[in-house]
Amino acid sequence: MSYKKYLNKITTLIFDVDGVLTDGSILVTTKGEMYRKMHTKDGFALKTAVDKGFNVCIISGGNNEGVRFRLKGLGIKDIFLGAHHKTETMNLYLEENSIGKEQVLYMGDDIPDLQVMKEVGLPCCPQDAVQEIKRVSKYVSHKKGGKGCVRDVIEQVLKVQNKWLDSYSVSATYD
């Protein structure tokens, strides 16, 4: 079955950070500070999804306050950093919000995302995800992690649901 048949059922978008919202690189300073770079087009799409009423959730094994600051600035409230049991974290989030797994698009890129991706309605990944993740994905973006893959999947969901740029009104700065 084509992944496009799932797009209209999606109410919840869950993303990993490293390798999805970023290209997976971490810049480490001599003081031990870690920096990540995110794409503004992904930020625009995330903010648009929030403004259109989608549940947007971040589940990442990494724990970086700069990442949290960026995501909160986009209006994302459900941010789980330092989540070493992603499936457990997701299941609790879905239960607390009465969301069915078939309503979930999850985008991950590496082995820590494998089990959670097997449980959702629409598992997706960036072009440069590892092979194990590509095998369980119903959609592999033509964009790489940190290079617009998040925008790619969000735009597709919103377009199918006639919510992409209809009466355009994104409320916050996304860059």
Image (tube, rainbow, N blue to C red):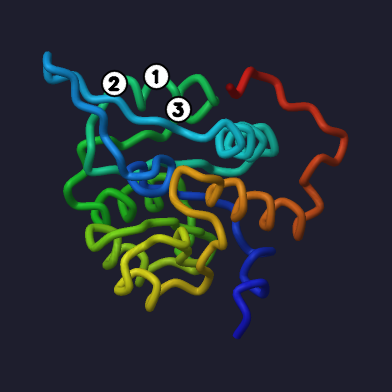
Check disc 2 and give the amino acid type: Glu
* Quadrant position of residue 50: top right
Q: Position of residue 83 (x, y in %)?
A: 22, 43
Residue depicted at 54% across the width and 25% down the height: 75
Residue farthest left in this picture? 31
Give SS at disc 1. Answer: helix
Query: Which residue does the numbered mark 3 point to in the structure image?
Result: 71
* Quadrant position of residue 49: top right
- Which dot marks residue 65? 2
In this picture, residue 170 sits left or right of residue 2: right
State which tag comes first along the sequence, 3 or 2. 2
Residue farthest top in this picture? 31
Residue depicted at 65% across the width and 19% down the height: 172
Classify 158 as above or below 22: below
| Circles 3 and 1 in contact, beta carbons < 8 Å | yes
- Of residues 29 and 10, the one nearer the viewer is 29
Mark 2–mark 1 distance (CA, rounded to whole Å): 6 Å
Classify 70 as above or below 45: above
* Quadrant position of residue 69: top left
- Which dot marks residue 69? 1
Check disc 3 and give the amino acid type: Leu
Mark 3–mark 2 distance (CA, rounded to whole Å): 10 Å
Residue depicted at 38% across the width and 52% down the height: 95
Give SS at disc 3. Answer: helix
| Circles 2 and 1 in contact, beta carbons < 8 Å | yes
| Circles 3 and 2 in contact, beta carbons < 8 Å | no
Classify 85 as above or below 4: above
Residue farthest bottom in this picture? 1
Q: Position of residue 147 (x, y in %)?
A: 51, 45
Classify 116 as above or below 38: below
